[in-house]
Image (spheres, grey):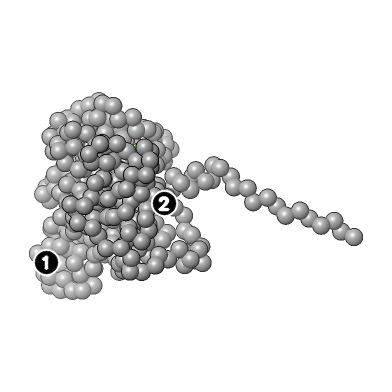
């Protein structure tokens, strides 16, 4: 008689749990099985937003099923769960988390460390993308922003216009003022004739600086004073280094850049709001891609200043041949087409 086999233990590898947690925070979690995705559909018709006057806290960090809030009056932080029926809001679009950094919420304090989110106010704006690998779900990086600083680097990693353009489109669509920061200028002799200069020619605000050498930080500090500002961009461009340079006691982890690929190593693992007397600044994990939401192909040109006055059809194509010929000579023409293609693929 053959010996009966013992069932294999299903013990989880703690490293993979941590990695999953980190991926969740970055919003880069891998595709989940179709069946599993179906099971987690939230019920429809739940809570409605509460008036701003009823809120008493701001969300400063979001974790799977929990968030950290800063209470207005006592300036203390609480780790909170959600009263589902009062927080999960109805809507056509599913969010990967019921709240995001910057949200104004009502919290019931349950202990000196913990609390319960029992209400969420409407957002004045939000920066959202499609959650990678989960097309039906929206990942909102942060909400209620006064400014977005798109951080890039002139070198290590190389300046990447693709991601910058998508952030510019998303911010313009949400009416959020945006500044492009080009970091690591200590690594080049001159910024003359570089690609970022062409963004300033289009009317965007571009600031060149070095977080490491603390060069030319003044204009940025002035810009973000008393504003809730989100710092976003690829991994390794120096978002955390920059915040550490302007917030002396910020102890965010700074990583290194892979010398072979020139890419960052996703050192920051979750968005964190730093609340200071000079303003509220949000450090975020580097992202690989920014897939736009809430934009119709026929409206895309409105968010490219060089094309916004041209005539387009609903598919985002030029109607007027003459305008199209002129557009072809614009340096962001191919970028427009790439973004359009991704919108039409949906
Ligand atoms: N030469 C130079 N290196 C810099 C500068 N700013 C940042 N770095 C380096 O770039 C690397 C990445 O910096 P981080 O601040 O961790 O980058 P990040 O954008 O926060 O990366 P993630 O958290 O992974 O998204 C570190 O080795 C920094 O020391 C700079 O102005 N000049
Ligand atoms: Mg970082």
Task: Please tell me in which quadrant of the rendered image residue 341 appears.
Answer: bottom left
Question: How many numbered marks appear?
Answer: 2
Side of 86 where 53 appears, left or right: left
The single residue placed furthest to the right in the displayed view is: 1
x and y percent of residue 162 in the render? 28, 52
Q: Nearer the viewer, mark 2 or mark 1?
A: 2
Pointer 2: what residue? 65
Label 2: element kind: loop
The verdict on label 1 being within 8 Å of ligand 1 is: no
Asked if residue 259 is positioned above or below residue 290 in the image, the reply reads above
What's the residue at 33%, 51% (across, down)?
Answer: 117
x and y percent of residue 249 in the render? 28, 27
Asked if residue 198 is positioned above or below residue 3 in the image, the reply reads above
What's the residue at 48%, 48% (across, down)?
Answer: 20
Residues at marks 2 and 1, CA–CA distance in whole angstroms:
45 Å
Pointer 1: what residue? 310
Q: Earlier in the sequence, mark 2 or mark 1?
A: 2
What's the residue at 81%, 57% (across, down)?
Answer: 4
What's the residue at 33%, 44% (across, down)?
Answer: 109
Q: Looking at the image, can residue 267 be seen? A: yes
Towards the viewer: 110 or 210: 110
């Amino acid at each position: 008689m053959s010996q009966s086999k013992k069932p294999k233990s299903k013990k989880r590898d703690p490293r993979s749990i941590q990695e999953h947690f980190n991926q969740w925070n970055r919003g880069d979690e891998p595709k989940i099985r179709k069946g599993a995705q179906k099971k987690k559909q939230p019920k429809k018709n739940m809570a409605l937003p509460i008036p701003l006057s009823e809120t008493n806290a701001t969300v400063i960090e979001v974790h799977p099923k929990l968030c950290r809030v800063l209470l207005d009056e006592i300036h203390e932080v609480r780790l909170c769960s959600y009263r589902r029926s009062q927080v999960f809001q109805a809507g056509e679009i599913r969010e990967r988390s019921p709240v995001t950094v910057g949200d104004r919420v009502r919290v019931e304090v349950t202990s000196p460390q913990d609390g319960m989110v029992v209400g969420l106010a409407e957002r004045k704006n939000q920066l959202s993308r499609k959650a990678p690998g989960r097309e039906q779900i929206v990942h909102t990086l942060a909400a209620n922003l006064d400014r977005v600083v798109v951080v890039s680097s002139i070198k290590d990693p190389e300046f990447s216009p693709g991601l910058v353009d998508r952030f510019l489109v998303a911010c313009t669509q949400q009416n959020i003022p945006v500044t492009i920061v080009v970091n690591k200028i200590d690594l080049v002799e001159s910024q003359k004739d570089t690609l970022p200069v062409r963004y300033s020619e289009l009317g965007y605000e571009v600031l060149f600086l070095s977080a490491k050498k603390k060069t030319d930080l003044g204009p940025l500090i002035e810009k973000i004073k008393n504003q809730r500002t989100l710092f976003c961009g690829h991994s390794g461009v120096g978002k955390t280094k920059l915040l550490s340079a302007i917030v002396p006691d910020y102890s965010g982890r700074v990583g290194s850049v892979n010398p072979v690929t020139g890419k960052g190593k996703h050192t920051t693992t979750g968005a964190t709001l730093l609340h200071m007397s000079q303003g509220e600044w949000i450090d975020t994990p580097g992202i690989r891609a920014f897939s736009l939401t809430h934009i119709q192909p026929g409206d895309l040109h409105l968010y490219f200043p060089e094309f916004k006055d041209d005539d387009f059809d609903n598919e985002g194509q030029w109607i007027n041949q003459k305008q199209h010929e002129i557009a072809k000579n614009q340096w962001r023409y191919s970028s427009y087409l790439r973004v359009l293609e991704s919108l039409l693929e949906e």
